[in-house]
Image (tube, rainbow, N blue to C red):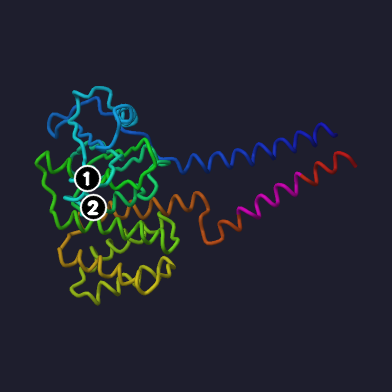
């Protein structure tokens, strides 16, 4: 009888460990995409390295981004001058995060892989996707990596530079707006304590509504923002609410047509929702976690006590 009880104890422990393991696996990002094959129509993959990387770090990034043959890709460096040019950043910035861009056929959409999620501390793949769609990058597979912990802005700059030097000029105002959007996203995650995924979902949902309603005035933009905040049960300070309204009113002024990428915006929002559903990340998530482990450990405690009674 005791052997049977001991077996149940270990079985419960293994179940608890398995559940912890699967939750970590669900949150992991994809590895870099393979780039051995050159698309003769669209051109070779482009790799842009942070200029501050040491030679050994550069080799590490090559490995992370699966660049087996440097002659099979177009390679560039992204510098402080570039971050000042493309996203109005500090010219003296240290640049570490790097990116590989594989251009895709029309209709394939935008895929973002953060290869080193532990080292990209501020920008999530959904934030990159939102910003790049705003800037006009619609059909590409983008891999991001860094050998050290950084915010991730260097990689965004590198992506813009890659399109520029390859002759696919992106609109300067849209790039600046996309950079400001990324700043708003990271600010909301930091100041308001919002989930990074929740911020990305909010931005994607607002863009979807702009595509559907085509607001003609700032007041209509403000109503869309208010509606989505209410729908997602998000409370912001007056200043941050105004920051969102101003951001999306600029998008309206630039006449950015989000109809063309509406399906991708829906994918961003649904991916975030699916992730939350899989992990049980509703408002009572942490209470559920606490209750789960309290029940597990109480059961284990009761069983262990029973062994000696």
Between 188 and 142, the one lying in front of the other is 188
**Mostly what secondary structure, the magenta segment?**
helix
Name above or below for residue 8 compared with residue 273: above
Residue at the spot 18% in from the left edge and 51% down from the top edge: 136
- How busy is the neighbourhood of tag 1: few (under 14 within 10 Å), some, or many (20 plus)? some
* Residue tagged 2: 89
Name above or below for residue 193 compared with residue 76: below
Point out the stretch of residues depicted in magenta.
289-300
Q: Earlier in the sequence, mark 2 or mark 1?
A: 1
Q: List x then y, in percent, for residue 205.
A: 32, 61
| Quarter of image, res 215 | bottom left
Residue 23 is one of the magenta-drawn residues? no
Circle 1 SS class: helix
Circle 2 SS class: loop
> CA gap, disc 2 to disc 1?
8 Å
Name above or below for residue 256 compared with residue 54: below
Q: Quadrant of the N terminus?
A: top right
Left or right: 120 with respect to 131?
Answer: right
Residue at the spot 21% in from the left edge and 59% down from the top edge: 177
Callout count: 2
* Residue tagged 1: 80
Q: List x then y, in percent, for residue 134.
A: 22, 55
Q: Are marks 2 and 1 in contact (CB under 8 Å)?
A: yes
Left or right: 25 with respect to 221?
Answer: right
């Amino acid at each position: 009888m005791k052997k049977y009880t001991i077996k149940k104890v270990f079985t419960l422990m293994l179940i608890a460990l398995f559940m912890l393991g699967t939750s970590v696996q669900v949150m992991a990002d994809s590895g870099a995409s393979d780039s051995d094959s050159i698309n003769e129509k669209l051109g070779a993959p482009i790799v842009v390295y942070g200029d501050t990387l040491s030679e050994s770090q550069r080799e590490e990034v090559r490995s992370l981004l699966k660049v087996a043959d440097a002659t099979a890709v177009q390679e560039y460096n992204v510098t402080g001058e570039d971050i000042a040019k493309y996203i109005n950043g500090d010219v003296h910035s240290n640049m570490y995060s790097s990116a590989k861009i594989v251009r895709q056929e029309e209709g394939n959409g935008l895929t973002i892989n953060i290869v080193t999620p532990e080292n990209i501390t501020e920008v999530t793949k959904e934030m990159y996707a939102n910003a790049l769609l705003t800037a006009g990058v619609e059909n590409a597979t983008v891999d991001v990596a860094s050998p050290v912990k950084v915010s991730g802005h260097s990689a965004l700059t590198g992506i813009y530079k890659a399109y520029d030097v390859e002759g696919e000029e992106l609109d300067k105002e849209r790039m600046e707006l996309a950079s400001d959007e990324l700043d708003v996203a990271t600010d909301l995650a930091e100041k308001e304590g919002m989930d990074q995924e929740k911020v990305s979902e909010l931005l994607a949902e607002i863009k979807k509504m702009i595509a559907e309603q085509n607001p003609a005035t700032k007041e209509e933009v403000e109503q869309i923002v208010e509606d989505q905040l209410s729908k997602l049960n998000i409370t912001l300070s007056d200043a941050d609410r105004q920051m969102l309204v101003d951001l999306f009113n600029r998008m309206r002024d630039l006449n950015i047509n989000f109809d063309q990428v509406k399906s991708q915006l829906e994918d961003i929002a649904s991916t975030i929702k699916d992730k939350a559903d899989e992990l049980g990340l509703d408002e009572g998530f942490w209470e559920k976690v606490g209750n789960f482990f309290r029940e597990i450990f109480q059961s284990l405690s009761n069983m262990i006590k029973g062994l000696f009674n």
